[in-house]
Amino acid sequence: MDKLNVLREKAVQLLQQNANDERERKKFELICEKLKDDSCFLNMDIEHSYAVLRDLGIEESSVKAIYSDLISR
């Protein structure tokens, strides 16, 4: 499974886990919506992309490499 699909699944899991926390739920609803677009990381600026990856629980040491992989597909 490619990295984007893994991130999509993680976003859905986090959305479900945070269903009772309105602020977190809205954040993950927005992330899920953005991730529907296959080129979403190409359309976001780097800071926003990094923030999304961090929100999805990606370790700081892996953020740059995963971002680079996502924009090079």
Image (cartoon, rainbow, N blue to C red):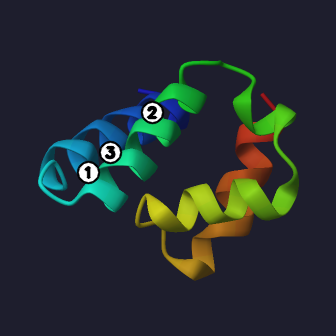
Q: Secondary structure at mark 1?
A: helix
The answer to which of marks 3 and 2 sits earlier in the sequence is 3
Q: For label 3, count other residues whose C-alpha is less than 10 Å away and answer few (under 14), some (14-19) or many (20+).
A: some
Above or below, 63 against 33 in this view is below
The answer to which of marks 1 and 2 sits earlier in the sequence is 1
- In whole angstroms, how far apart are the C-alphas of marks 3 and 1? 6 Å
Q: As drawn, is 43 to the left or to the right of 21? A: right
Give the residue furthest to the front. 22
- In whole angstroms, how far apart are the C-alphas of marks 1 and 2? 10 Å
Q: Nearer the viewer, residue 12 or 6?
A: 12
- The residue under label 3 is 10
User: Given contact means CB atoms under 8 Å apart, are the residues at marks 3 and 1 in contact?
Assistant: yes
Instruction: Point out the frontmost of discs 3 and 2.
Output: 2
- The residue under label 1 is 14
Position in image of residue 22 (x %, y %): 27, 55
Q: For label 1, count other residues whose C-alpha is less than 10 Å away and answer few (under 14), some (14-19) or many (20+).
A: many
Q: For label 2, count other residues whose C-alpha is less than 10 Å away and answer few (under 14), some (14-19) or many (20+).
A: some
Above or below, 36 against 27 in this view is above
Q: Residue at x 64, y 64 (%)?
A: 51
Q: As drawn, is 10 to the left or to the right of 46? A: left
Position in image of residue 49 (x %, y %): 72, 54
Q: Residue at x 41, y 66 (%)?
A: 57
Q: Secondary structure at mark 2?
A: helix
Quarter in which the C terminus is drawn? top right
Q: Secondary structure at mark 3?
A: helix
Three-letter amino acid code at the position of disc 2: Cys
- The residue under label 2 is 32
Q: Residue at x 87, y 51 (%)?
A: 45
